[in-house]
Image (cartoon, rainbow, N blue to C red):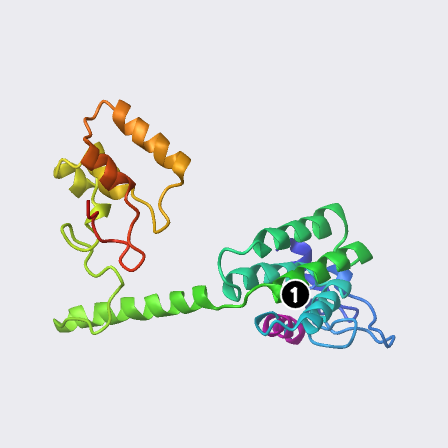
């Protein structure tokens, strides 16, 4: 946040915070706005909260209005900060909306002004993109759950007990379920002499769909031509897809 947003002065000389010059002035009714008041006479904190809840509930119209209200009122910086947060807090991972919001923000703040009509269009577009995306708090839920488990594990250790809840990887030891991760890229794997052969036949396997025909052909030929000696069984193990129900199980071939 720049200095203008950190410290500006109201008409009575009092210090205002988080209020850029473009957010000052009169509201729609011709009255002087309070430091955190939008042009429509609403609290920007309430409108921002409304925007987030509208995105979660996939309410396109309310999300579009809330974004427009913040943008036109000079709180574009607040709008874009929040929209980028909603992308990771309230939407399912792997959607294109993250890059869309970033592009709309770039247009609204670098090419145009956030509170002019083109900036407002960007705000509405971004809010609609978020509201139309699949809602999920999976990342926030994961963060909260993993953090709670971390605390629980530490408390159980202090009491000398086994935790009733643990991380999904357990103790993450060699020879266990996740043995494939201990290849030559790890200290333990290096000590065990797990080189290219182990990596190809265990660590580099993909799934559950497996490699495409073209990729499989390339891998087969690369292993045939490799300075490391691979037999046909090794190649088949390397190309065998991981199991959909147990992705960490070893190759069956």
Give the quadrant of residue 223: top left
Left or right placement of residue 106 versus residue 165 in this view: right
Left or right placement of residue 58 versus residue 28 in this view: left
The residue carrying pointer 1 sits among few (fewer than 14), some (14 to 19) or many (20 or more) residues within 10 Å by Cα, namely some
Q: Is residue 48 magenta?
A: yes
Quick one: quadrant of the N terminus? bottom right
Location of residue 251 with respect to 75 vertically, above or below: above
Residue 127: horizontal and vertical position, in percent? Answer: 66, 63
Residue 212: horizontal and vertical position, in percent? Answer: 40, 40
Q: Name the residue rendered at 48%, 59% in the picture.
A: 93
Location of residue 66 with respect to 228 vertically, above or below: below
Residue range in magenta is 46-54
Quick one: quadrant of the C terminus? top left
Q: Nearer the viewer, residue 250 or 82?
A: 250
Location of residue 117 with respect to 66 vertically, above or below: above
Residue 159: horizontal and vertical position, in percent? Answer: 14, 73
Q: Nearer the viewer, residue 73 or 189?
A: 189
Camera sees residue 117: yes
Provide the residue designation for mark 1. 17
Residue 235: horizontal and vertical position, in percent? Answer: 24, 35
Q: What main secondary structure does the magenta stretch of the protein show?
A: helix
Q: Nearer the viewer, residue 132 or 208?
A: 208
Q: Secondary structure at mark 1?
A: loop
Camera sees residue 185: no
Give the quadrant of residue 67: bottom right
Q: Nearer the viewer, residue 177 or 26?
A: 177
Q: Name the residue rendered at 70%, 59% in the picture.
A: 125
């Amino acid at each position: 946040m720049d200095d203008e947003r950190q410290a500006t002065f109201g008409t009575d000389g009092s210090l205002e915070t988080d209020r850029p010059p473009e957010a000052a002035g009169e509201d729609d009714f011709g009255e002087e706005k309070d430091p955190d008041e939008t042009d429509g006479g609403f609290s920007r904190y309430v409108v921002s909260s409304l925007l987030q809840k509208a995105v979660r509930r996939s309410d396109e119209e309310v999300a579009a209005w809330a974004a427009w209200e913040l943008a036109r009122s000079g709180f574009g910086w607040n709008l874009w900060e929040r929209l980028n947060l909603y992308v990771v807090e309230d939407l399912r991972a792997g959607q294109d909306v993250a890059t869309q919001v970033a592009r709309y923000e770039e247009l609204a703040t670098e090419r145009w002004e956030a509170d002019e009509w083109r900036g407002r269009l960007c705000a509405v577009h971004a809010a609609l993109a978020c509201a139309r995306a699949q809602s999920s708090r999976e990342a926030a839920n994961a963060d909260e759950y993993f953090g709670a488990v971390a605390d629980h594990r530490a408390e159980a250790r202090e009491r000398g007990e086994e935790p009733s809840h643990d991380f999904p990887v357990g103790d993450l030891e060699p020879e266990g379920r996740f043995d494939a991760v201990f290849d030559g890229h790890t200290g333990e794997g290096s000590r065990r002499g797990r080189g290219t052969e182990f990596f190809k036949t265990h660590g580099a396997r993909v799934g559950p769909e497996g490699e495409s025909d073209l990729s499989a052909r390339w891998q087969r030929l690369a292993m045939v031509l490799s300075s490391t000696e691979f037999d046909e069984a090794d190649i088949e193990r390397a190309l065998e897809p991981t199991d959909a129900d147990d992705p960490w199980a070893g190759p069956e071939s």
